[in-house]
Image (tube, helix red, strand yellow):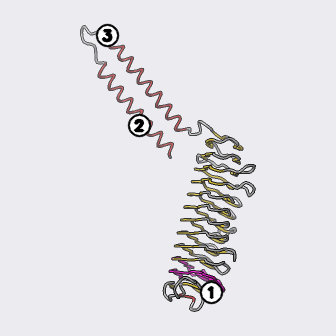
């Protein structure tokens, strides 16, 4: 669409230029009057025509460049990039490997196949954008850092996007029909407006599998994953995320998972649990979240049997078969805060239950 807009704009400019030049030629090339030098009139017409041809040539050159954005550094087959620079995919390929930093790769709407970063050297300060792939990952031996992945779709692989590095940003990316949509196990990574979906309910391991330390997810969504968001590690934050369908919505999956904050998130149409913190470590919080089982879910919110500084605050649960709230202590359906040393006594009305 971008190229089409450029083409349309350039074409319009060319038509405008032709109109102006023809107008000039017509006004300056009226029929000679008696005694007028016919040679001078013809010379002026010739000059106008030459200028018109130059204008058209320049315009057509601009149109050709806009129609072929890969003119400078095209990739036409599977390749290993080992020189820093800007690259553009000119056709679908089966694999691209990036083994050098400071690379910009525009997939240009094509399929890059298996895209690998850092298989023989660490990669940083890279950008990959605007296209498709089967999968995209860095390596455990050479994790990527400060990489921007933007507007990329990964389909039909084991893991759509897998990153073990640090401070990478995935924005407006989607993963479809993979066993795992996104696996993020490094430090300080961010996912914004990303989505994972499966065509069959409960397929695979999960939409988002988050480990490591201090990773942040905002406005991300999972549909029909076995688990929407499976969370381990330390100090992660999930905000405005949603899980629909599948087994469980949000699961803090290990006792080592500490200081996890899940805020303003929604779990719906799950078959087991909306938010499950039954095995969570200390200082985890679920705030202003909604669990709607859609008459299929077993439990909306599950707390730990021995929680430490766990917070459940201003949540809402509805349409769960067994319990809206479980394991949050006495009168668990309406407990706000469980065993929080620095919080006020539980207020029996801040977490809401509706059937």
Instruction: Give the residue furthest to the front.
Output: 342
Q: Residue 213 at x, y = what percent? A: 65, 66
Q: Which residues are magenta?
A: 288-317
Instruction: Tell whether 234 sits left or right of 337.
Output: right
Residue 12 is marked as 2
Residue 209 appears in the rendering: no
Q: Which sits earlier in the primary sequence, circle 2 or circle 3?
A: 2
Instruction: Give the residue furthest to the left.
Output: 34
Residue 38 is marked as 3
Tell me the quarter of the picture where residue 85 sits: top right
In magenta segment, residue 190:
no
Q: Residue 198 at x, y = what percent? A: 64, 65
* Helix, strand or loop for disc 1: loop
Circle nearer the viewer, 1 or 2:
1
Is 220 situated above or below 68? Answer: below
Residue 309 appears in the rendering: yes
Query: Foreground: 309 or 184?
Result: 309
Instruction: Tell whether 143 sits left or right of 34.
Output: right
Q: Residue 26 at x, y = what percent? A: 31, 22
Q: Are marks 1 and 2 in contact (CB under 8 Å)?
A: no
The residue wearing badge 1 is 327
Q: Spatial distance from mark 3 to mark 1, Cα to Cα?
A: 101 Å
Circle nearer the viewer, 3 or 1:
1
Q: Spatial distance from mark 1 to mark 2, Cα to Cα?
A: 67 Å
Disc 2 residue crowd, few under 14, some 14–19, many 20+, Cα 10 Å: few
Is 49 situated above or below 16? Answer: above
């Amino acid at each position: 669409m971008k190229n089409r807009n450029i083409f349309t704009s350039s074409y319009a400019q060319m038509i405008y230029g032709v109109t102006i030049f023809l107008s000039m030629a017509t006004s300056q090339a009226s029929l000679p009057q008696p005694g007028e030098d016919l040679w001078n009139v013809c010379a002026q017409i010739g000059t106008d025509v030459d200028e018109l041809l130059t204008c058209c040539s320049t315009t057509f050159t601009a149109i050709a460049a806009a129609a072929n954005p890969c003119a400078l550094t095209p990739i036409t087959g599977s390749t290993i990039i080992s020189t820093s620079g800007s690259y553009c995919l000119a056709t679908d390929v089966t694999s691209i490997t990036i083994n050098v930093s400071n690379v910009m790769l525009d997939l240009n709407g094509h399929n890059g196949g298996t895209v690998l970063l850092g298989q023989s050297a660490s990669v940083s300060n890279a950008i990959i954008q605007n296209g498709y792939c089967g999968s995209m990952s860095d390596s455990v031996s050479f994790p990527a850092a400060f990489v921007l992945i933007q507007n990329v779709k990964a389909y039909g692989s084991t893991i759509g996007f897998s990153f073990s590095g640090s401070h990478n940003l995935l924005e407006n990316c989607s993963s479809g029909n993979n066993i795992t949509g996104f696996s993020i196990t490094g430090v300080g990574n961010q996912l914004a407006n990303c989505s994972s979906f499966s065509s069959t309910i409960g397929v695979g391991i999960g939409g988002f599998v988050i480990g490591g330390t201090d990773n942040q997810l905002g406005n991300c969504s999972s549909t029909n994953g076995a688990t929407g968001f499976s969370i381990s590690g330390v100090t992660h934050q999930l905000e405005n995320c949603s899980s629909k369908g599948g087994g469980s919505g949000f699961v803090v999956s290990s006792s080592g998972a500490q200081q996890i904050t899940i805020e303003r998130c929604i779990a719906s149409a799950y078959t087991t649990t909306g938010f499950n913190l039954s095995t969570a470590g200390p200082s985890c919080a679920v705030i202003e979240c909604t669990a709607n089982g859609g008459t299929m879910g077993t439990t909306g919110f599950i707390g730990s049997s021995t929680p430490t500084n766990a917070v459940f605050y201003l949540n809402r649960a509805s349409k769960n078969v067994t319990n809206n709230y479980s394991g949050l202590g006495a009168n668990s359906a309406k407990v706000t805060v469980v065993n929080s040393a620095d919080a006020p006594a539980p207020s029996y009305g801040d977490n809401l239950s509706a059937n």
